[in-house]
Amino acid sequence: MKINFLILFTMLCCMGCTNSSRKQNIPDKTTCKATEISYAKGFRIHRFKEYTQLTVRNPWDTTRILDTYILVDRNKKIPAKLPAGTVVRIPVERVAFASSVHAGMWNQLNKAQLTVGVCEPEYFSIPIITEGLKSGKIADLGMATSINTEKLIAASPEILIVSPFEDSKHTEFEKVEIAVVKDASYMEELPLGRAEWIKFEAAFTNESELADKIFSKIEKNYIALCRKVATTQERPTVFTEKKYGDSWYIAGGNSYLGRFMRDAGASYLWKELNQSGSAPFTFEKVYAKAINADYWLLKYNDKQGDMNYESLKNEYNLYANFNAFKQKHVFAINTAKTPFYETGPLEPDRVLADLVHIFHPGLLPGYKPKYYFNLEKDK
């Protein structure tokens, strides 16, 4: 059976080496082996005899490279001739994270104990990290958009892993020899593509075999769910999130969220919005389009308690007019209690299962959701 939403391809090693080596000064004809990347578009890995080269594509200009990392065994001398790029000695022994999702990847690779600093600790729930923050072994580096440089230097990580934004430089850390690693996984359009970045992170820890094993299991589960969905013709309508201030941010049809909805067998109301990011809409425009939708999915953060239909109505009275509200078809994630941002991108198969359970409950009898819960049911 042909599955349109999966992008499968095999990388040709020689072509990959030629493209990534155009600025290199490589002695002789060094053997290169490309790591197979099946879904992610944002990075490539080429392994040479004396080093590994990681390239990150610029998400805002896909004809250019955002950054290149040259990984060299820390127990060996740095080769005399290397291609242009940031040299990192591996396996890395001290790491700092600007985002909890990257820490989640290292936790899956059994390397979270190498953490020495994190930004925005309130979004971390990995026990070894939360315990380290309490004891002072792990530094609170402040906001990801304005990292406390003094605390970062004191923590002395070998690498700082960040989610890059357009025109972000992070050049201030180069002077103190902290390599800034730009993980652009959040820019991937495919859920499996985002999860495949675990291979990128694993290159810094020498855990590539484990990463392949983890991703292979995710891929198998995801494809199996998509095949189940393909057996049903029903496609309920769905919209997402809620308004903040005067704007309601809607994810485009080509977005990560839009792909999830399609793969889960739903008709996303903004599937024709031809973009991968989000766009602001007025409440009135969302109301006009989504008033009769079958389902409403949203995320919120509340440490004090879980949202219910009454509290959602109290936020904004007109929410109660949506058909999904009237039918008790509002499903939400409380990100203060469920580590969605930390683990969700790493297990798209489980997120997809939650969505299939919502839209087509008959396909997964007895299933217990992990992330999305009805505001009153499922608890």
Image (spheres, rainbow, N blue to C red):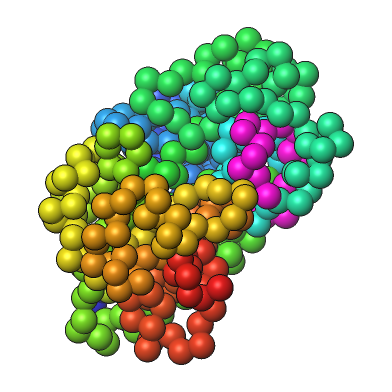
List x then y, in percent, for residue 75.
78, 35
Q: Looking at the picture, does residue 345 appear above or below residue 74?
A: below
- Magenta span includes 123: yes
Q: Quadrant of residue 146?
A: top right
Q: Looking at the picture, does residue 307 appear above or below residue 237?
A: above
List x then y, in percent, for residue 82.
55, 26
In the image, farthest residue toward the right: 135
Query: In this orientation, which residue lies closer to the viewer: 300 or 258?
Result: 300
- Locate residue 21 relative to residue 367 in the image: left or right: left
- Magenta span includes 108: no
Query: In this orientation, which residue lies closer to the viewer: 375 or 259?
Result: 375
Q: Give the range drawn in magenta.
A: 109-125
Q: Looking at the picture, does residue 311 appear above or below residue 73?
A: below
Q: Which residue is drawn at 34% across and 70% down?
A: 329
List x then y, in percent, for residue 8.
32, 64
Q: Which residue is drawn at 53% across and 14% down?
A: 171
Report whether residue 208 is seen: no
Q: In which quarter of the image is residue 239?
A: bottom left
Report whether residue 211 is seen: yes
Quarter of the picture containing the N terminus is bottom left
Q: Which residue is drawn at 55% across and 58% down?
A: 306
- Locate residue 238 relative to residue 196 in the image: left or right: left
Q: Residue at x 37, y 20 (%)?
A: 167
Quarter of the picture containing the C terminus is bottom right
Q: How many marks?
A: 0
List x then y, in percent, for residue 340.
53, 55
Q: Looking at the picture, does residue 370 appear above or below residue 363?
A: above
- Locate residue 144 relative to residue 281 in the image: left or right: right
